[in-house]
Image: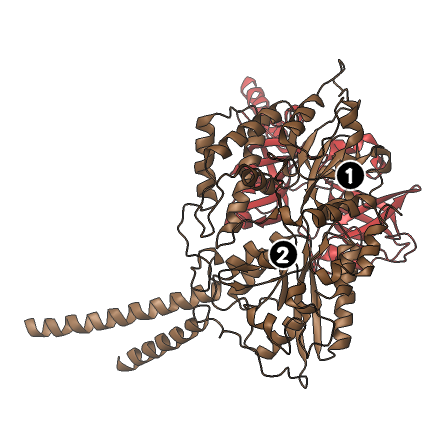
Amino acid sequence: MKRLVSLLLLAAVSLTALTGCHGAKGLEPFSIPEEFDTSRDYEITFWAKNDTNKAQTDIYEKAIADFEALYPNIKVNLRLYTDYGRIYNDVITNIATQTTPNVCITYPDHIATYLTGTNIVVPLDELFADAEYGLGGSEVRFDSPTQDEIIPKFLEECSFAGHYYAIPYMRSTEACYVNKTYVEALGYELPETLTWDFIWEVSDAATAKNADGTYKLNGQNVMIPFIYKSTDNMMISMLKQKGAGYSTDEGEILIFNDTTKELLYTVAEHVEKGAFSTFKISSYPANFLNAGQCVFAIDSTAGATWMGTYAPLSDISEEALVEFETVVMEIPQFDPENPQMISQGPSVCVFNKSDPQEVLASWLFAQYLLTNDVQIAYAGTEGYVPVTSKAQNSAEYRDYLSRSGEDNNTYYEVKIQASQLLLEHTGDTFVTPVFNGSASLRDAAGQLIEHVTKSVRRKETVDDTYIEELYSDITSLYRLNQSRPQGGESAGKAELGPLPATAVVLLAALAGAWVLIGVYVFTEALKKRKKIRR
Amino acid sequence: MKKILAIVLALTMALAIVSCGETADVKGEGVMTHAEYIAAELETEVVIETYVQAKQSWWDGKGTFYTQDKEGAYFLYKMACTEDEYNKLTPGTKIKVTGFKTEWQGEVEIIDATYEILDGNYVAKAEDVTSLLGKDELINHQNKLVSFKGMTVEAAAEGSDAAFLYNWDGSGQDGNDLYFNVSKDGQTYTFTVESYLTGAGTDVYEAVKALKVGDVIDMEGFLYWYNGANPHITAVSAAK
């Protein structure tokens, strides 16, 4: 029996050690090596997001080839994604198995969740400032921008929980792509800045039908005057413009307020008139805009190459295309004197590894993405803007902007107008607070609009009772009523998902071993008692 | 004699009932026939009984399914189910589904659905719709398991000798959707291997990667719709 107990104890100790290795302890914090060891070879992975755009993937591949030519001892493996959500899901899964990529395109909201693990993401403050390998560092083998040359507003978006956890890669905002031909056909003139009142009024007017059921404006059976691609952004932007609550910087949820309710009633009113729908419910705004079935299409400036009669990219057949004049405008505002629009676009984070040299190699590659070659080329694929003043002020980029409209591809007018919109309004952009759970709050914001829109289409009543229930359902669905530790690496692990099966098995075995030990000890104690009683 | 006659008649009726059961679905109370489903307006609640034919993906408590009864097909988009339940919904499983009928870029589907498993099993055979390609009647087979016979593989892009692209424009890599062109009677159509439905490593994914321009092939797949027919191919073989 002693042998059995010894074996069980040994198993318990071993299992404790094994399970302790996983997750809880995590990696050691990264510290910058004295010198980059070029005598060794490194293989790093880069998870990149593209907009299903061959030009973008070509640029990633060229950037990797150029970087590998500068650093022959670093091999970069590219894995391509077409949506941020998928990257986020895969990173979360890979954190649990310690197989995160080295460098990853992502959103600050997502990084805040990654930070719930211990030393998962590398804080970049010291790397930025490192004289040898930092931004503009003396040992960097390419023309790297200095920290001052990164547009401050964009860089600040990557600072949260007390550190810089990312570098901006590209920036975009949302734009309203307007069928000006239709607006004028309805008897309206576009104002300098779109207002919500204007957009709703014109959209309502566009729903007028002929006796045969076709729409007066386009003579077709389909017309959705106003389509918003990202309802997350729609709600967030409206609340911001209204100065209403969304969340605090610390993660207190403020979105379920009366202003939100008022906005949802407005949405409901115009859905009922057939004036408004969303991407999730009706499909891509560009498809309707280009088919002459939409007047106001709000989408990212990074979707500009899909917008307009002569858009270089299109999902609809040529015979479905309609000729019209496209105008790129700011999203509608409540206060045109103080326009506010969201800042979005990919950022890049570096994941920590047990080998600091590998992390340094990863950082060098991440930094390479800020060079003019990459920045200018990638920004030109869509209505993005480069994130460095070095690239924005370069002769090459200024020349690119000046040639707007020269063709319907590289110099596609709508695309360059979209970039210009952000360049001119960088100071009017905002971001939402980043904390563990901010990604869920963002989803919840959009779902409020999606639910109301669906309900009205289904002839359900949207009233105070409905809104109260909706608030309650969304709060519960997105776990917005759970208190969460704020940012930093001491934060909880609520969003890291379930433990991997191997860990569950090990923990179960550990529990089983302790139960058996307990049973043995208890049995032996009973035996002693019995002996005493006897 | 009367007794014998009565027994024969009873047996005949019993056989007829059994036979009816094999050829047509008998729907439960309050359940729509496929024709009623097709006639139902968009954005209205629908209740159907159908059989799982294929599963496209599961994430975050929702699964996407191709389903079909003996009259027609139903695409269930992001139906609420746990991952365990998703794994149990194997091809042939009969389910009762309550959800909302909607349309997304031409694809008629059921969303916000819940389901319960019923007794019964049916796996559809692919219906040859080659002759309907390019015709309006093709939409009557939307979401069904269909086949296309004797089609010729064309270049995936102008000026290229590649038979397929990763993603529609070649912007993807191994593991992403495959797009390929096939022709019949002088008309070319773009078909897709949807990576969530049949990803890298599946027979069809590898078979399409091995295609050469000029190959003549037979295919099976689900007749998905996106701005027109966009079949999600699940099997490819040399034309018989």
Residue under numbered circle 1:
B229
Q: What element carries label 1?
A: loop
Work out whether A317 lies above or below A38: above
Task: Please tell me which residue lies in front, B84 or A415.
Answer: A415
Letter of the chain in red: B
Residue B20 point in image, percent of width and height:
63, 28
Give residue B123's quadrant in the image: top right
What amino acid is at disc 2?
Phe
Which residue shows up at 54% across the image and 46% down it? Answer: A442
Residue under numbered circle 2:
A154
What amino acid is at disc 1?
Ala
Q: Residues within 10 Å of mark 1 (few under 14, many from 20)?
A: many
Q: Nearer the viewer, mark 1 or mark 2?
A: 2
Task: Please tell me which residue lies in front, A322 or B17.
Answer: A322
Q: Residues within 10 Å of mark 2 (few under 14, many from 20)?
A: many
Label 2: chain letter: A
Q: In which quarter of the image is the N terminus of chain A?
A: bottom left
Task: Please tell me which residue lies in front, B129 or A216.
Answer: A216
